[in-house]
Image (spheres, rainbow, N blue to C red):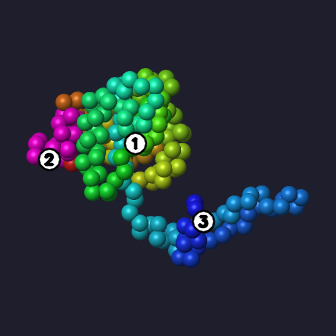
Amino acid sequence: MPVPEVRQLVELGLVEAIATGVDARLGPLTRAPQYGITGAGRSRARREPLPQVLLVPCSMGKAEVPAAPAAEMYVGPYHVAARKAAAAAAADGSAQVLTLSAKFGLLRDEDRILHYDLRAGQSGTVSPHVLARQAHFLGVSAAQVTVFAGRSYADLAATTWPALERPLKGLGIGQQLAFFADLYRPSRRSGIPRP
């Protein structure tokens, strides 16, 4: 955490410095100060709304390049429809859209990736441990998550977020695509509820 942000949190009484380990011969075991959340910080954290995340799956259809940002690499029609729907659902800025890659895990649009061929559930799929670490790094490990993907990707995401929302559960592929179209073309409402 950058120092100005830590200072601000200390001034607000939300975190406090905690003792670091000291070795008699070597001195402090870390040069970085460590902080713990205070009672006031816990209380405030309980009142804060959880971040909202919309997950879209990667796709087998990829750009014909060796490497590219995630937003440019995935060109399959299901991914494109899911991404358009997620972007429409998050247009007010209330949610972050991430791609769930079978190989690389959680991706932001700007994350550069290599071309690959892998689907969720196949040997080599990103591990639940890696997904959990990525979620922590991205600050979304406690997020409210909605997954705009089929069962294999939803099941993979559920290893990190067991209570995630699955609006496509039980829908056939045509119904899933209609769900997406209802989000990015609201004039076409088909009666499927929005997330």
Q: Main secondary structure of the magenta part?
A: helix
Label 3 sits on a secondary structure element that is helix
Q: Quadrant of residue 192?
A: top left
Label 2 sits on a secondary structure element that is helix
Residue in the image at 24% along x and 48% along y: 88
Asked whether the residues under the numbered discs 2 and 3 touch, taking CB atoms below 8 Å apart as contact, a structural biologist would say no
Residue in the image at 68% along x and 68% along y: 18
Between 143 and 70, the one nearer to me in the picture: 70
Give the residues drawn in magenta, as a range. 175-193
Q: Is residue 174 left or right of residue 38?
A: left
Q: Is residue 15 above or below residue 99?
A: below
Examine the rendering and report whether any part of residue 156 can be seen: no
Could you tell which of marks 2 and 3 lies nearer the N-terminus? 3
Mark 1, residue position: 109
Identify the amino acid type marked 1: Asp
Label 1 sits on a secondary structure element that is loop
Mark 2, residue position: 186
Q: Is residue 163 left or right of residue 181?
A: right
Examine the rendering and report whether any part of residue 25 can be seen: yes
